[in-house]
Image (cartoon, rainbow, N blue to C red):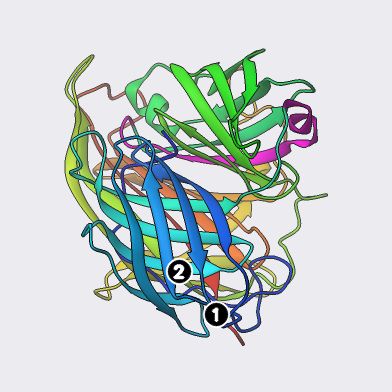
Amino acid sequence: MFLVKLFNYIFLMLLLAAAWGCGPAPAGGGVRTYHGAASNGDAFTFSLDPAAGVLTYHDLANGLASAKVLFTQAVDGSISFTDPSRNLTALVELPGTALLATIRRGGRGRRTEALVLALPSRSLTPGDLSGLSGNFMQFRPAGGGVVVGTLRGMFGGGFQSTGYQPYADLLGGGAEPFIQAAGHSVTPGAGGDSLGVSGFLDGTAYAFGDPKTLFALDTSQGSVISLPKAADDRFPAGAVGTYSALVYTKTGANVAGPGAAETGAVSTGPATVTISGTTTRAITAVDGQGRALLSSVPLLPIASFNLTGPGELGDPCHGLFAYQIPSANPPSTQWVFVAFPAGGVVFASFTGHGAAGAGPAALYDYFYGVGVQQPGS
């Protein structure tokens, strides 16, 4: 479990300062440990010893591990390394805040590419969930790829949440609740720094991170990234700038029928994301080959759209931004979703080729990614 089917290269992460902000990454320091969720559903642990220049990781889902990955770290947070297991393909760290990795040998068969988001290990108890009240994006390995919504933790364990999934509208079934509002059995992990959540979606999820800031749930249906809600729908100060990012893209996707695997062409790699504008903000994204993913798409508070009906978003989700791009000939609809954790950007897009209710024969494309703001931008 822990995150879902993805990315394959890395971006330039940078600089620290209370969150994912600006300032050079320290060269030394003590050992840093992280829990990670991979977009294909695998769970990871990482330990970095910057003084020795050695990284250790373990894929808890398939047992793949390396006890001695030699690395050097640049001042921008990017990491050069040699992995004896030939699994890690890219690494970037914001020390004490987040670690990103791309892998190529995930899954039970050790053949799945994925992006891993890892957060610092910290003490976590079921009672801490009462501090969780955030927006979320879910990066799915299949079944439409993208869900956004609101997630609230309950004292002693359990969650209440609703979410919007454009794929459900394309199929014609209407949007459905992402998580039914119900209690779950929550138990502390063996190390005291994660939680096991039974009955979550179709199995057990694993939770880690800080419920008041960045928090993640690793599930068999994809990684759920919880982001703090804003006080209002205003665009966050300081978000305008350029971001180095990693992106996972699937084009020509389709699920032929119940139980069928999602098809489609997958590509992963680095991207550059630009947030621009003064009164109106817009997002532009270009992949590592210079191809446009998004071209100056305006951003509006997600509450501007009619997504708060039954079984959809449960509140205005302040801090979550979106845009809908319809096309009449041929019919298609693209949704773009963007959020801004401090110093970073999390973004996703879903394009359905066909009118709403087109059914399972319709093709669709999606991509999603994470970026870190470049210094001085």
Q: Badge 1 local density, few (<14 within 10 Å), some, or many (20+)?
A: many
Residue depicted at 68% across the width and 20% down the height: 158
Q: Is mark 1 on a helix, strand or loop?
A: loop
Q: Is residue 36 above or below residue 173?
A: below
- Near-viewer residue (86 or 331): 86
Q: Where is residue 97 in the image (x, y as percent from the top left)?
A: 63, 61
Label 2 and label 1: CA atoms lie apart by 13 Å
Instruction: Return the mark for residue 374.
Output: 1
The answer to whether mark 2 and mark 1 are in CB contact below 8 A is no
The quadrant of the picture occupied by the C terminus is: bottom right
- Name which quarter of the figure residue 220 lies in: top left
Amino acid bearing label 1: Gln
Range drawn in magenta = 126-143
| SS category of the residue bearing label 2 | strand
Tag 2: amino acid:
Val
In-image side of 41 versus 134 (left or right): left
Q: Residue 92 carries which label?
A: 2
Decide which of 224, 62 is in the foreground and name it. 62
Residue 129 is covered by the magenta coloring: yes
Where's residue 334, x and y in %?
Answer: 39, 46
Residue 136 in percent (x, y) is at: 59, 40
